[in-house]
Image: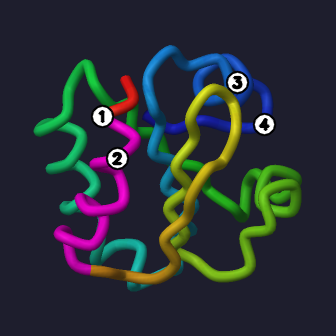
Amino acid sequence: MEVNESNFREEVLNSEVPTLVDFWAEWCVPCKMIEPIILELERENANRLKVVRVNVDENQNLAIEYGIMSIPTIGIFVNGVMVDAIIGAVPKRVIEEKIKKYLLLN
């Protein structure tokens, strides 16, 4: 699901489950490399994890607010707060390890 500045609060900050936010851009090759991994994690964790994408070129205020300096950046939000981040194209197991502890809280 694509989110933007107008629905970010509703979809991410007010989410009842942990939310993985993929900060990306159309021109970013590493972003395209991890997209299948993100989609796979979304399928595998349905109902326990919400997965959304934010195009930083179209939503620069969100990128600034959350200190996104490099993309891809995967932000992990719990109870309206970005509690963790993963920067760069990383293997699936790295993302799984990071999100595991937040899924357990839910």
Alpha carbon of mark 4 to alpha carbon of mark 3: how far? Answer: 6 Å
Estimate the x, y position of residue 96 in percent, counting from the top left: 24, 59
Is 59 rendered above or below residue 34?
A: above
- The label shown at residue 104 is 1
Alpha carbon of mark 3 to alpha carbon of mark 2: how far? Answer: 26 Å
Residue at point 37%, 23% (across, down) = 106
35 part of magenta stretch: no
| Foreground: disc 3 or disc 1 | 1
Alpha carbon of mark 1 to alpha carbon of mark 2: how far? Answer: 5 Å
**Label 3: which residue?**
7
Please state which amino acid type lies under the numbered disc 3.
Asn
Q: Is residue 4 left or right of residue 16?
A: right
- The label shown at residue 5 is 4
Is 101 rendered above or below residue 47?
A: below
Which residue is nearer to you in this view: 60 or 93? 93
- Residues tagged 1 and 2 counted as in contact (Cβ below 8 A): yes
Alpha carbon of mark 3 to alpha carbon of mark 1: how far? Answer: 26 Å
Residue at point 59%, 35% (across, down) = 3
Please state which amino acid type lies under the numbered disc 2.
Lys
Estimate the x, y position of residue 50 in percent, counting from the top left: 39, 30
Among the 4 quarters of the image, the one containing residue 105: top left
| Foreground: disc 3 or disc 2 | 2
Alpha carbon of mark 1 to alpha carbon of mark 4: how far? Answer: 29 Å
Which of the two discs, 3 and 1, labels the residue nearer the N terminus?
Answer: 3
Residue at point 28%, 55% (across, down) = 38
Estimate the x, y position of residue 41 in percent, counting from the top left: 20, 48
The residue segment tinted magenta is 91-103
Which of the two discs, 1 and 4, labels the residue nearer the N terminus?
Answer: 4
Which of the two discs, 3 and 2, labels the residue nearer the N terminus?
Answer: 3
Please state which amino acid type lies under the numbered disc 1.
Leu
**Label 2: which residue?**
101
